[in-house]
Image (spheres, rainbow, N blue to C red):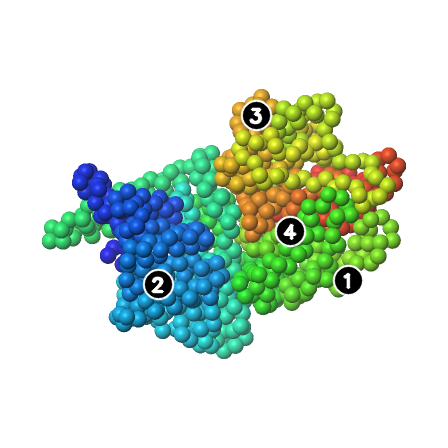
Amino acid sequence: VLDTTGHHAEAEALCRKIIALLDVDRGLRQHPWLDEVHSYLALTLMRQGRLLEAENAARSAARGALARRGRFSPHTAWMLRSLVSVLLEQQRYREAETLARVVVDMFERTGTAPESLRLATARADLARALASQGRDRESLREYDVIRAGLRRDPASLRQFFDGHVGYAELLLKTGSADAALAPLTVALQESRRLVGDGDRQTAAIRASLARAYAVSGDVSRALDEFGEAVPTLLKRLSDVEDEAAPSWRPDPRLVVTLGAYMGLLADTRGTPHERERGIDATAEAFRLADAARARAVQRAVDANAVRAAVHRPGLAEVVRRKQDTKNEIAALYDRLADALSQPRPEQDTKVISELRDRIEALRNRSNVLTTQVETEFPAYAELVNPKPVTLAQARAMLQPGEALIATLVTRDRTFVWAVPHAGPVAFAAPPIGAEEIETTIATLRKALEPGAATLGDIPDFDLALAHRLYSSLLEPVRSGWHDARVVFVVANGALGQLPLALLPTRPTALPPESGALFSNYRQVPWLARTHAVVVLPSVGSLATLRALPPGEASRRPFVGFGDPWFSHEQAALAAAGGATRPRDAVALTTRSMPLTLRNAPRTFDSSDLHRLPPLPETAEEIQSIATAMRADPGRDVFVGARANEETVKTLDLAGYRVIAFATHGLVAGDLEGLTQPALALSAPDVAGVDGDGLLTLDEILALRLDADWIVLSACNTAAGDGAGADAVSGLGRAFFYAGARALLVSNWPVETTSARALTTQLFRQGPRMSRAEALQATMKWMIDEAEFVDGESGKIVFSYAHPIFWAPFTLVGDGGGAAATEARNPMIN
């Protein structure tokens, strides 16, 4: 009753109390009741978003049922069904489908009647798993089977389908919005009765009803229902009462809801609906989009944020008080569970009321502490809980000559805003959905990460497709960004995998080669020629970064780490001068020249760090940047065994303006047991130091930096949280928190000679250039002038004008500030 009426925490406390009581009695410990209570606990934890704990409880229920009743038992099937529910909430849809089929099979093998509501519920779980994978027809067939089974019992048939949200969602998804209205209306009425209007469950149903109204053409009702539902859903998403708890995974249904609402807002611009409600549809959609850009990377950062807090005394005290408050709330819930577990005539209503009042007071205290963190430690607050930013706030962050382009890709549309420093905001919502965007980006990236063994294997970049992407997304909002010199970009999904700087601004065909290989790309009107492009991890991050005080003038110019040795064999080869370096002499047939890409293999475990490929050429890269920055190579360059974890942790990195890591960036899963992004450094047994050879995300969070630049140049660290959905990795977010103002990260495995040329030239740019201008100037130099020269013959072999060479690096963060200090600007081949 407590759980179904929205008192999830009280229900949890009561479940734990019952489990403790049953565990004490040997006889009761063997009773199936214990499994059922574990199952109830799993479901109430799931409804609180504590999915890892919910999975553990569900597995306890399943293990107990299997031990007591065996596999082929309706009881065991029903206990397994709670695990299916948790897997669905965790978005592990294939696993949920497999287990749901097992549950249905168990019910059928044990003779469960087709009209059984439990069998119908289990089959509905299977239908939801199928629908979540886009297999809508298969899902509908499962509902047809349910309907056929329940037809013998009209009461059960009505009970199941009247108000069945999953079925209504499927009807809505498959174009039967009118048919979805009735069950959603019933479901909303029932949810309001049980848990009230403020509960997330009610808000989610209301949002589905709003979508149905929108598709059915009832714009007024749709706006009303969205207006009621979305604030509650966003509040639940941003609720961070316990930063140490497993984070609530962004619900794909929420993304669908926000996309539908933004689409409705886009379509009502300039209509009586907008005027009557007194809303700015463009601004409201912008705010919602910032909330919808939930990143997987945020989950990795959240998991390590509290550990990082202990290194900052003032912050540590506030976080400790928040943790104490949470523990007090948990203790009071235990007492409340005791009070509620008494027979109703014996319950002390005064005590129960007082306990609930104290819990509410502690929740208010927790909210005050959260506000204190946001006020006094904004960087930490932005780290663990980035807040949605309004259009007015976004404009206020910009300086003259700057503009912001923000995008949100949804299933059916892509929303694009262009916000200038002054003047009207441009907004477009072209009907280009996630699938088309993903296909386009994947096609374009074939020429950027082709897995090429030689230069001749590099495909032509699809200029026509790239321009179509520009015409669809950037051209409609051109008025909002064209007059700026620097364009900040906040993207989501696949758009985060492609630098917008390499989009052609006019239709163009690749002319025939008339000089060095790839020199024909010099004629392409890339966006990089007219605008400096900077990526932001979120809209609000720009304000956080610009609030940082200027760096200490006494900082040294540069420190770099490169060419780590991952094994004794690599160390011995380097000592003997036999390390394989990029070829300075090439074959007569230019296109047969081997192409050296920096990329880590994906098929080794934690004992195989030594199998990481060596990066000997990065030693020269680090040395070249040090020379350009007038650093002291003997003091500030760490290569080979010196590029190790202990050195990074013990060196006073706050004393450097530019910090470079020319090594492999790893993501969770690259090594067995690696659960977070990391940088690979020299193996501990090779370097003679402690540690594991990895600088992990939580260790980066603990660093103290005062850096204008962090350079991550050895592989595709910009996709560093896996799945390629974001432009900025967990490593990047960690470096920002540690004190970096800007990052230079790569979007795909880089070709090694061009990477060395680009990073070296970047820090030779004039000291009066901003970081964004310096990178733009370097890209233009790479396109127009930089060439690979055969070390033996002195002949020009190929141009770096193909975007695989000049476009892999993205500037992330604050694009202002100087590129380098006291640096010269020689032009080099």
Judge depth for marks 2 and 3 and give the one in front: 3
Expressed as whole percent of the image width and height from the top left, the position of residue 37 reads 26, 48
Q: CA distance from mark 1 to mark 2?
A: 52 Å
Q: Which residue is mark 1?
A: 508
Q: CA distance from mark 2 to mark 4?
A: 40 Å
Expressed as whole percent of the image width and height from the top left, the position of residue 140 reads 42, 67
The disc at residue 534 is 4
Q: Quadrant of residue 481?
A: bottom right
The disc at residue 684 is 3
Say which amino acid is labelled 1.
Thr
Quadrant in which the C terminus appears: top right
Say which amino acid is labelled 4.
Val
* 466 horizontally vs 38: left or right: right
Judge depth for marks 4 and 1 and give the one in front: 1
Say which amino acid is labelled 2.
Thr
Helix, strand or loop at mark 2: helix
User: Of residues 13 and 130, which is closer to you in this image?
Assistant: 130
Say which amino acid is labelled 3.
Pro
Name the N-terminal-most of marks 1 and 2.
2
Q: CA distance from mark 4 to mark 1?
A: 25 Å
Q: Which residue is mark 2?
A: 202
Judge depth for marks 2 and 4 and give the one in front: 2
- Measuring 52% from the left and 34% from the top, which residue is drawn there? 699
- Measuring 43% from the left and 51% from the top, which residue is drawn there? 95
Helix, strand or loop at mark 3: helix
Residue 314 appears in view: no
Residue 318 appears in view: yes
Name the N-terminal-most of marks 3 and 1.
1
Q: Residues within 10 Å of mark 2 (few under 14, many from 20)?
A: many
Q: Residues within 10 Å of mark 3 (few under 14, many from 20)?
A: many
Name the N-terminal-most of marks 4 and 1.
1
CB within 8 Å, label 2 to label 3: no
